[in-house]
Amino acid sequence: MTYNSLLIATSNPGKLTEINYLLKELLINPYQKANLKILSYQDFPPVEEIEESSISYQENAVKKALLSAKRFNLPSLADDSGLEVEALGGKPGVNSRYFGGEISFKEKRELLLKLLSGVPFTDRIARFVCVAVLALPRGELFISRGEVYGCINQEERGETGFGYDPIFYYPQLNHTFGELEDWEKNQISHRAKALEALIPKILPLF
Ligand code: ITT
């Protein structure tokens, strides 16, 4: 069965921008899939937000993708992602969005820096994890995972990206993710890796 639209199932504007860019660069450009229309929740009347109740990235991502695929009758792509800090036993991890409760992302970053104050650079290893799921309306699922390693910087740097990007230092480029141009982050990110692996499943649908 073929379709003419793919729904990106996220309410996070930073993620949406990245997934849009990644799909257009990875899919439409190289493969000339001009007939593929990429939609987001903004193209539909508002619906209730999907609650993320699981302690696993995969279960959350499957739930988001599958509910959207059924609700909108379209192939849907969702990701569940997080930042894992080794010195904090992997926290905030799958709980990254809710870390520190109802506070802004700036406050979440500050809280993380505070928890790591005094921890030397060599012990500040961290990784971003992304589990991406493509769900089809009849329930078929394709799942992939991407990771990127770095360190938690001593202070915030840069203003690009979203979420924890300004405190995630990527040694190979000697910058935080918050200092990278969008296209630079999209070459190396956990999300780029997870989505790239799904491309062979996405292409035949359109
Ligand atoms: P959706 O579920 O609607 O997609 P969300 O923000 O709730 O949006 P997650 O549940 O996957 O998404 O939460 C992961 C959080 O981890 C997210 O809110 C970000 O703050 C953070 N995060 C994930 N990927 C990130 C990235 O590439 N850069 C910075 N922070 C990231």
Image: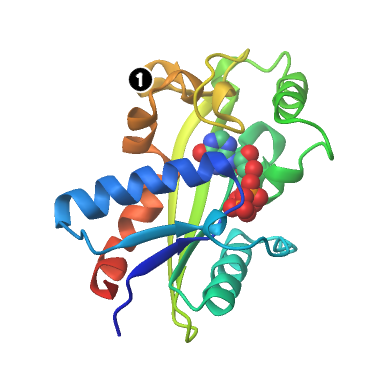
Secondary structure under the numbered disc 1 in the rendered image: helix
- Asked whether, in this view, residue 150 is left or right of residue 50, the answer is left
Query: In which quadrant will I find the C terminus?
Result: bottom left
**Horizontal and vertical percent for residue 32?**
15, 56
Does residue 163 lie above or below 117 as drawn?
below
> At 29% across and 80% down in the image, what residue appears?
2
- Asked whether, in this view, residue 105 is left or right of residue 58, the answer is right
**Horizontal and vertical percent for residue 55?**
71, 60
Mark 1 lies on residue: 173
**Horizontal and vertical percent for residue 18?**
43, 42
- Asked whether, in this view, residue 111 is left or right of residue 172, the answer is right
> At 20% across and 60% down in the image, what residue appears?
33
> At 41% across and 39% down in the image, what residue appears?
189
Query: In which quadrant will I find the N terminus?
Result: bottom left
- Is residue 127 among the parts visible in the rendering? no
Does residue 14 lie above or below 53 as drawn?
above
| Nearer the observer, 49 or 92 | 49
- Is residue 18 among the parts visible in the rendering? yes
> Residue flagged by tag 1: what amino acid is it?
Leu
> At 46% across and 18% down in the image, what residue appears?
179
| Nearer the observer, 25 or 118 | 25
